[in-house]
Image (cartoon, rainbow, N blue to C red):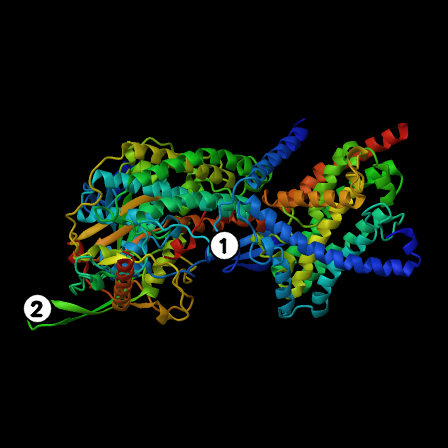
Amino acid sequence: MSEGLLGSEWFRLILGLLIVLAFSQLNALFLVWLERKVAGHLQLRPGPMEVGPHGLLQTIADGVKLVGKELILPFKADRKLFFLAPVMVFMPVLVGFLVLPFSRGLIIRDMNVGVLLVFAFSTITVLAILTGGWASNNKYALLGAVRSVAQNVAYEIPLLLAVLSVVLVVHSLSFAKIVEYQKTVWFIFLQPLAGLIYLIAATAETNRAPFDIPEAESELVAGFHTEYSGMGFGLFFLAEYTNMFIVCAVATSLFFGGWNGLFGISLGIPGVFWFLLKTYFLIFVIMWVRWTFPRVRFDQLMNFSWKVMIPLSLANIVITAIVVKII
Amino acid sequence: MAELEKIEASDRVYSLNLGPQHPSTHGVLRIVLDLDGEYIIKADPVIGYGHRGHEKMGENRPYKQFLPNTSRMDYLSGMLFNHGFVLAVEKLVGIKVPERAKYIRVIASELNRISSHLLWFGTYLMDLGGFTPFLYAFDDREQILDILDSITGSRLTYSYCRFGGVSRDVDLKFIEMTRAFLKRMEKRWADYDSLVTKNVIFIHRTRDVGVIDRELARQYGVTGPNLRACGVAFDVRRSEPYEVYDRLDFEIPTGTKGDALDRYDVRFKEMQQSCRIIDQALDQLPEGEFLTPKVPQKLGPPKGEVYTAFESARGLTAYYMVSDGSPGPYRCHIRVPSFGNLNALNDVLPGTLVADAISILGSIDVVIPEIDR
Amino acid sequence: MGYFKDIIDGGLSLIEGMGVTARRLFQPLITVQYPRKKIPLSSAYRGHIELKIFEETGTHKCIVCLNCEKTCPSGVIRVQGEKQKEKGPKTLTGYVIDFSKCSLCGLCVEICPTSTLEYSREYELVGDTGADCVFDLMLRLAKQVEQREEKKKTQGIAA
Amino acid sequence: MKIHDIEARMRGKFGDLPLKRDETGVTGASWSIAVPIGDLRDAATEFNAAGFFLESITALDFEDTFELVYHFNCFEPGSRAVVRVLCGHDQVPPSICDIFRGAAWLEREVHDFFGITFSGNVDMRALLLPEDADYYPLRKTFGKVGAYHKREVIYG
């Protein structure tokens, strides 16, 4: 996508949307496969092996199965909200792609409020989960929805505080500028605490273990999506993995230098590869964590958030502000 | 509690039907929970979904034909239940058991105890949301099943013990496999420690959760590791030694508080003690017969009754049989440990969170078909 | 400083746990892709029962004592015998088991006075109906005898 | 040893006659005591005060009577004791569920299987059987059974 090709703004948007849609679906399918492979090998088993080479086509087969399944509406459920929720959970995820800086110039829209936009839209996910859980007319789903909201309050604040300390240094909310700033030194080295807090909070944001308390399959059966069948469940599932990609991509841009190589050494590898490499590595780490730890209880997550993450990130911001002022 | 009672009057309380189909109810258990938010106000376990009438079956068949039933009550410690039943009948009829058979039974029983505890370990972690330890535990359990498979020919419902011995002698390959297993486990304990026991999330999920204290345990007849977790060193293998347990040197691990973490610790150490027992029993294993040849096909026990207690993986289990002199028992009752252990939940669950309820249910290690019989 | 110590200790314990799982990534897999690969059966494996063929007679030794039928806890076994002569031993005419009810205890094999019962080593037993679980052991025996003879023949030709 | 204390107290209360020691060890208990149905709660209270736990409750169905068998044990080696209560087919034994909390379920189980109602146990719902079960499977009049004896046939 060179500058010359992008004469019309509309062309650029539509092309971007198409690429995003295609990429997000393929990416989610790949991530589901990856998750199963990572889980498998961590547990000394091969994971899916039957469909395609090393089971690569397994998730596509599963997807086809999900599409073919009947959408069941539970008794006395709120029909409109019930079907709205899966759509609502997937929409904001797509918006996130608009501002992700895959490489220099490979951004659909480099807005000066890019960082804000991603986090503003990702919050809608919680609303969608609440809607889905509420509309299902199922107590497990409701409990999951309630937990999700409680969890949201706990992790959103440290998440944004951690991001803020980066923004304070760069003086910009634009992803491109933040990544440019990390040309030689990544922010994870300057702001290790903020980076760590971001990763923990991001795991919670995507409802991944050990913070998968709204789903908590051993407690709430499947939490908020207990009653969803077929593609209703499929959309929740795809959204979870796409969301995971987005938070990891954001983490890569904010803390791991985006398209930049380590300490400015790019080894001649194109920026987009650096970006994807780092993003997928972070995704792998999140998977690795999921398949290692037991789940925390939601009050413990709150305790951890209010007593550890928020004070530490606040302190981090204050120190950052002072250092920035002095320099 | 006063605060809770006030809430109970309000209409905020709703009931949640946990089970019979639920990922963490270990068999078919249903608990009707009255909830305020996520806090449990009242818990009413509903059991009996797996009732097969084993006691009635025992009454209308000869002792020998009841053998296969015994390993189907608590399917996780089938060998132990099998063993206990054989002990009871031998005591009633007065059958002498060769020394070698006694040792073989102890080894097989302890192997079964470890396999049962390993399965509990895995599923408990799964209840807490950790999936991977489950598969590691199953890897180890698979070794035990292979070992038991090599002598009994079965992997779960063994039917291995016979009146006056065991059905098949052990060979050198069995001893080799068992020794290799003991060696393998030495390394595995450290792995489990790093992966689970020391894990800060795990500790937070279990510490001070679901405390069963000494008095509560006594009131409900809680036995086994759940009782030992609150500091009572009561183990049938010690208090009424059967077979050769009095010749073997092993400790009875106890806890202090009786919370889920203590129960975890006790079971974990128990597995290590079982390894010690097996090691010694293998050393002492004498040569000789594995089955008394003189046992008649049709048993004619004297009139009277027998009550034999033994330590299954879940606690004090006992066979109570009344004989009228015929080849089958007049009355056959089985005292199962999970019954009391689960019963205690009536008092333990109120005031906890749903998430903790799952943790508690997992930590007391119930096998529902054993309760239902 | 207990506050920070708790955080750091907790964090370290988590990293230790991740180390355990990470090591597994580089260990060989322990599962077997079942229908493609198979694990050898235990020598003591207890399948359903089968009539044993004795080398010296080339057939079973069942004397229709009905001990197995009587001792079976689940009533799986049905044995039929006929007297060939007025005063003589019975000979086996039918031996049918309903495997769907069998609890694999092995009491029948142990009680058999002529040890003519043995465990089958088949474990891939799938059927669509309950009737598929009913095995006629006489029929199976006949088939086995046939196979044996064919084998002998081919071996004889090869030799 | 708690078992000796409680034995002395039982002898004091009910006399020497109903108490039977078991030297052979076949019954698994040091001694058993036959208690009249009215004194069951007193006996249970004694055991509770002495720190025993209730191991099991079960019943035996004889042609002439039911017999309730209570196994008590404490956390000491070889301390099992049995309380036996004769309970006619139409009698209603008292519940001990307020003395031992675990007794509530055990009594429900006995009620399930034998149809013996315990007075004082408010919760007599079916425990192991279906809610609508109107049969008592462990009675000797139900299903296939070998024999239906009088009590003296077995216990002399």
> In front here: B206 or A119?
A119
Report the residue that reaches farthest toward the left.
C87
Question: Can marks 2 and 1 be said to lie on one chain?
Answer: no
**Which residue corresponds to the image point at 32% horizontal and 64% vertical from the top-left?**
C99
How far is the residue under mark 2 from the one under mark 1?
A: 60 Å
Q: Residues within 10 Å of mark 2 (few under 14, many from 20)?
A: few
How far across and down, in percent of the image, does residue C60 sit? 20, 62
Q: Position of residue A115 (x, y in %)?
A: 83, 47
- B43 sits to left or right of D152: right
Q: Is residue C135 left or right of residue B123?
A: left
Q: Which mark is residue C133?
A: none
> Could you tell me which residue is drawn at 47 percent across and 46 percent down?
B138
What's the amino acid at mark 2? Answer: Gly
- Tell me: residue D117, above or below residue A327: below
- Identify the image quadrant of the C terminus of chain B: bottom left
Would you name the residue on which mark 2 appears? C88
Q: Position of residue B265 (x, y in %)?
A: 48, 37
Q: Which residue is mark 1?
A: B25
Element class at badge 2: loop
Q: Is residue A184 among the parts visible in the rendering?
A: yes
Closer to viewer: mark 2 or mark 1? 2
Q: Chain of mark 1?
A: B
x 80%, y 48%: residue: A102
Report whether residue D57 is seen.
no
Front in this rendered view, residue B161 or A156: B161
